[in-house]
């Protein structure tokens, strides 16, 4: 499978419960993460993490599946249409 450029949006509602687990999962898939931005949204009592990734659909699905299984974590992702663009 070809790697494609994409993004992942993660909303964390219970940061104190899952921060360590999230960081472990992101480290496990670190080779496909191009950039990471994390922003605490104190007024809403949550955090938002955005990732830029270069991954296959299988790699992205494995990572987002693990993240989405965590309590209080919502994940959405998308990959570009093909691996030949953005060169």
Image (tube, rainbow, N blue to C red):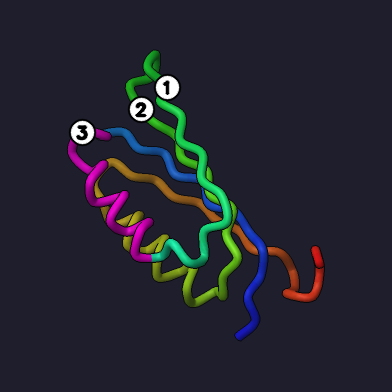
Rendered residue at 75%/73% (across/down): 82
The Cα atoms of the two marked residues, 3 and 2, are separated by: 10 Å
Residue designated by label 3: 16
Establish if 14 lies above or below 59.
above
Tell me the SS state at disc 3: helix
Residue designated by label 1: 41
Residue designated by label 2: 46
Assess whether residue 20 is covered by the magenta stretch: yes
Q: Where residue 79 appears, x then y in whole percent?
A: 64, 63
Tell me the SS state at disc 2: strand
Establish if 2 lies above or below 63.
below
**How many marks do you count on the picture?**
3
Q: Which residues are magenta?
A: 15-28
Rendered residue at 57%/59% (across/down): 53
Going from N to C along the chain, the mark reached first, 1 or 3, is 3
Which quadrant: the C terminus? bottom right
Going from N to C along the chain, the mark reached first, 1 or 2, is 1
The Cα atoms of the two marked residues, 1 and 2, are separated by: 5 Å
Residues at marks 1 and 2 touching, judged by CB atoms closer than 8 Å: yes
């Amino acid at each position: 499978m070809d790697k494609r450029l994409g993004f992942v949006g993660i909303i964390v509602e219970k940061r104190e419960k899952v921060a360590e687990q999230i960081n472990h999962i992101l480290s496990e898939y670190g080779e496909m993460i191009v950039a990471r931005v994390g922003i605490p949204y104190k007024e809403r009592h949550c955090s938002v993490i955005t990732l830029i990734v270069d991954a296959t659909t299988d790699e992205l699905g494995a990572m987002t599946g693990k993240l989405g299984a965590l309590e209080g974590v919502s994940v959405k992702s998308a990959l570009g249409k093909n691996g030949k663009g953005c060169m």
